[in-house]
Amino acid sequence: MSLLILVSSLFLACGPGVDNPSGDCTANGNGGRSHYHSPESGTTYLPDCNNALNRELWRVFAVSETSAYIIPRPDGTGLDYGLCEADDADLAGLFSQYGLCQENGNPSIINDIPPADALAITHALHERLEFTIDADGMISPWAPDDDIIAACELTSATAAIDYCKLLESRCSWGSCEDIGYIPGAAAVEALVPALNELYGIRP
């Protein structure tokens, strides 16, 4: 195979890049999360260059210059964060336009948002993000395993550390077991403030 054909094949496999509407910051990796989401070939992770937090919970992945999706899917977030009736009419309209003011949105709409709008949505969510303990005693909003494990580095609570060891134990010898572990009350109580610290959130 000639060098030209090889380079062309690699370009097609990776897909064309998409300009980031939020700025020229550099993405740290492809935006995927272990045990949760691996971006398909041809998609481009677009970090929010203006995010005031240390990390992104909601991440934007562009399929093209005109279409992007958000992971985790932001169904109902307009309701959760009071954005459907916000004083900012443009922001409220944005969440309403893409069905984020209902618990279960239309996938064909939610997964086909212009990148600039998707980044505006995640930016607004991160401005309001705070990890708490919900009525069922669970971490809210949901946090992926890699965030939980990173948060364990910020606490000395035995319950949280033991829970993180369980999460880490799912993978060995290059394979991972599809097992869901539920944290106990003591682990949740320790992990919530640790997650807020990890993200740089000041409750």
Image: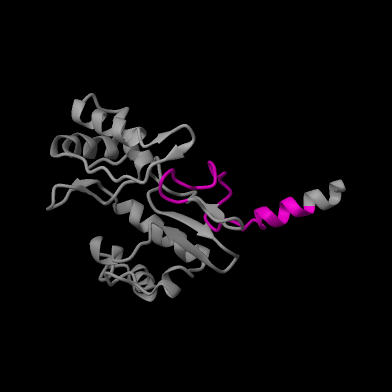
Question: Can you say whether 121 is above or below 101 in the image?
Answer: above
Give the residue displayed 60% in from the left and 65% down from the top: 65
**101 and 3: which one is in front?**
3
**159 and 101: which one is in front?**
159
Q: Where is residue 162 in the image (x, y as percent from the top left)?
A: 24, 29
- Please give the range of residues in magenta: 8-37
Magenta stretch: dominant secondary structure: loop
Question: Can you say whether 79 is above or below 147 in the image?
Answer: below
Q: Position of residue 110 (x, y in %)?
A: 42, 69
Give the residue displayed 66% in from the left and 57% down from the top: 15
Q: Position of residue 48 (x, y in %)?
A: 47, 51
Is 44 placed left or right of 36 in the picture? right
Please say whether residue 17 is one of the residues in the magenta stretch. yes
Is 27 placed left or right of 54 in the picture? right
**118 and 38: which one is in front?**
38
- The answer to which image quadrant residue 186 occupies is top left
**186 and 84: which one is in front?**
186
Please say whether residue 74 is one of the residues in the magenta stretch. no
The number of numbered badges drawn on the structure is 0
- The answer to which image quadrant residue 155 occupies is top left
